[in-house]
Image (cartoon, rainbow, N blue to C red):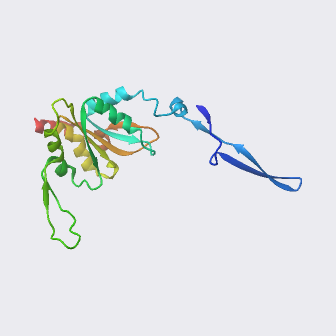
C-alpha cells in the first residue's frame, strides 16, 4: 500500500480548534489518502497491462459485461484497442432500446411523437445489427455492439445479448452493466445466468 500526499487545497486541509491562554486558536493540518497500488500513484490511465487479456477475452467469450469507474473515461482505451483490430462500432443506449431481439435482428416499428396535433404514425426500420453488417467494409473484422446503461435490462434481455454472437458470428457484444473502482469485465453469459446447454442450443439452431 502506498501513502499518497494530497495537494494542499480546501478539500485536503483540516482544522483543529483548541484553547490556549484564554484565546481560541485554529491550526491547519494536512490529510493524506491511501492508494491501492502503483496505478493509483502514477495515474490509472497510464498503466493498462490488461489490454492483451481484454482482446483475448473478447474473441473467446464474444459477449462481455464491463464495469467502469464512476468518473468515466477508462473504457475509451479498451474501445480504441478494438477499433485498432478492425472492428466497427454500433453504440446504443439500453434506455429506450425496447425489445433487444426485435430492435437488433428484426424489422421493427417506431412511433414518432405526434405532439397532439398530428395523426399517430408508425414507421418501420430495418434490423439494426443486420443493417450494419451489410454495410461493413470488406477489410472490417466485425461489428461490436456497445450498449451503455445495460444495468436497466432484464435478465432475459441480457441473455439474448449473450446469445447474439452465436446468432450473428461476426458480432461482438459489450454491455456496460455497472460501475466499479477500476475497469473490469466478465463473460455476459455468467452475469445473465445463461447455462452452457442454452448456448449450445442457440448455436445449433443457427447452424
The residue furthest right is 21
From this view, report whether residue 102 is shown above or below residue 30.
below
Q: Quadrant of residue 124 in the image?
A: bottom left
Work out whether residue 8 or residue 32 is closer to the camera in this orientation and state it. 8
Q: Relative to residue 104, is residue 187 drawn left or right? A: right
Q: Quadrant of residue 186 in the image?
A: top left
Q: Going 33% across and 53% down the picture, which residue do you hit?
A: 152
**Which percent across, then down, holds residue 87?**
24, 33
**Which percent across, then down, holds residue 60?**
27, 29
**Which percent across, then down, holds residue 41?**
55, 32
**Which percent across, then down, holds residue 139?**
18, 29
Image quarter where the C terminus lies is top left
The residue furthest bottom is 117
Count of labels in the image:
0
Q: Going 18% across and 62% down the picture, which residue do you hit?
A: 111
Q: Going 25% across and 49% down the picture, which residue do you hit?
A: 157
Image quarter where the N terminus lies is top right
Q: Going 59% across and 31% down the picture, which residue do you hit?
A: 2
Amino acid at each position: 500500500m502506498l501513502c499518497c500526499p494530497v495537494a494542499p487545497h480546501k478539500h485536503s486541509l483540516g482544522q483543529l480548534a483548541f484553547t490556549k491562554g484564554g484565546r481560541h486558536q485554529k491550526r491547519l493540518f494536512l490529510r493524506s489518502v491511501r492508494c491501492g497500488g502503483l496505478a493509483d500513484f502514477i495515474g490509472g490511465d497510464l498503466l493498462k497491462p490488461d489490454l492483451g487479456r481484454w482482446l483475448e477475452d473478447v474473441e473467446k467469450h464474444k459477449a462481455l459485461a464491463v464495469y467502469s469507474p464512476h468518473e468515466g473515461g477508462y473504457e475509451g482505451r479498451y474501445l480504441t484497442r478494438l477499433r485498432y483490430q478492425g472492428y466497427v462500432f454500433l453504440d446504443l443506449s439500453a434506455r429506450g432500446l425496447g425489445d433487444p431481439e426485435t430492435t437488433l435482428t428484426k424489422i421493427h416499428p417506431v412511433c414518432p411523437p405526434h405532439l397532439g396535433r398530428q395523426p399517430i404514425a408508425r414507421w418501420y426500420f430495418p434490423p439494426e445489427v443486420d443493417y450494419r453488417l451489410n454495410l461493413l467494409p470488406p477489410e472490417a473484422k466485425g461489428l461490436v455492439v456497445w450498449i451503455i446503461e445495460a444495468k436497466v435490462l432484464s435478465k432475459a434481455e441480457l441473455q439474448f445479448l449473450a446469445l447474439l454472437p452465436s446468432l450473428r458470428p461476426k458480432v461482438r457484444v459489450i454491455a456496460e452493466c455497472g460501475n466499479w473502482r477500476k475497469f473490469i469485465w466478465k463473460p455476459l453469459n455468467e452475469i445473465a445466468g445463461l447455462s452452457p446447454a442454452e448456448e449450445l442450443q442457440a448455436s445449433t439452431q443457427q447452424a
